[in-house]
Amino acid sequence: DQQVKQNSPSLSVQEGRISILNCDYTNSMFDYFLWYKKYPAEGPTFLISISSIKDKNEDGRFTVFLNKSAKHLSLHIVPSQPGDSAVYFCAASEMNYGGSQGNLIFGKGTKLSVKP
Amino acid sequence: DVKVTQSSRYLVKRTGEKVFLECVQDMDHENMFWYRQDPGLGLRLIYFSYDVKMKEKGDIPEGYSVSREKKERFSLILESASTNQTSMYLCASSSSGTPRVNEQFFGPGTRLTVL
């Protein structure tokens, strides 16, 4: 059973508008969450993360919101740019310093298309 | 900057061949991982390693093995390649320390086609 779900396989947004990518998780032991961005024929690159002691983390145009009670997080991109077009993966883990609990559990990804 | 390199960007092999995918990281990371990425299935963990000569099965280890003889190098082996192993293979590494615990750094990927 999927522990991390990204229910929207794709999202299309106009340049300059807000992109909102959603992610749900089921394991209450997860306490650290990451977003990765992936262009075709390249490896994923880290975008932004949040620990469970926070409900918001911001980095430039990117903000991640965490709602622990709903087991839901979202990535907001404002304003969206054509170069943001990529696949975005949500990942979750239990924060520790070794052992399989430190593995990342990935969602299936959401393909974002930002149209000029 | 962390660098994770993979031996090949594109590889074409025949069914039944033995295939080696090599991954090297230059940041002295303890942890290394092999994933495969398929459309609609996301990233699936094949094997991982938290130390030299140590390996653990991920979610889909069948048909694969790994080797970690040196800290910086993690190899994925397909003993007898099959067409259902056609995929994008991604290697990653991470440190067990701070600041962003569990953040993984990925290589560029190897697109393997098995004919």
Image (spheres, grey):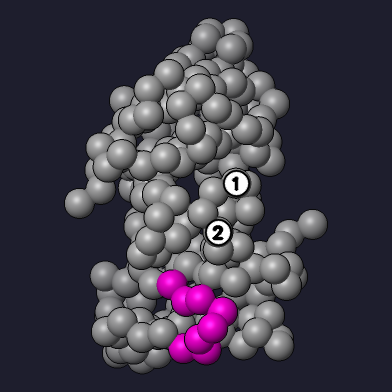
Residue neighbourhood size for the residue with mark 1, other residues' Cα within 10 Å, grouped as few (<14), some (14–19), many (≥20): few
| Image location of residue B102, percent across then percent down | 47, 57
Tag 2, which secondary structure? loop
Going by the numbered disc 2, the residue's amino acid type is Asn
| Image location of residue B17, percent across then percent down | 53, 8
Going by the numbered disc 1, the residue's amino acid type is Gly
Q: As drawn, which residue projects farthest toward the right? A: A1
Q: What is the chain letter for disc 1?
A: A
| Image location of residue A35, percent across then percent down | 45, 68
Q: Is residue A99 visible?
A: yes
Residue at the location (43% across, 19% down)? B69
Q: What is the chain letter for disc 2?
A: A
The disc at residue A96 is 2
Q: Are the residues at dot 2 and dot 1 in contact (C-beta closer than 8 Å)?
A: yes
Query: In the displayed structure, does residue A12 sit left or right of residue A62?
Result: right
Q: Nearer the viewer, residue A79 or A114?
A: A79
Vertical side of A29 occupied by B75: above or below: above
Q: Nearer the viewer, residue A51 or A3?
A: A51
Name the residue that disc number 1 marks.
A99
The disc at residue A4 is none
Q: Nearer the viewer, residue A113 or B74?
A: B74
Query: In the displayed structure, does residue B42 sit left or right of residue A80?
Result: right
Q: Which residues are magenta?
A: A49-56
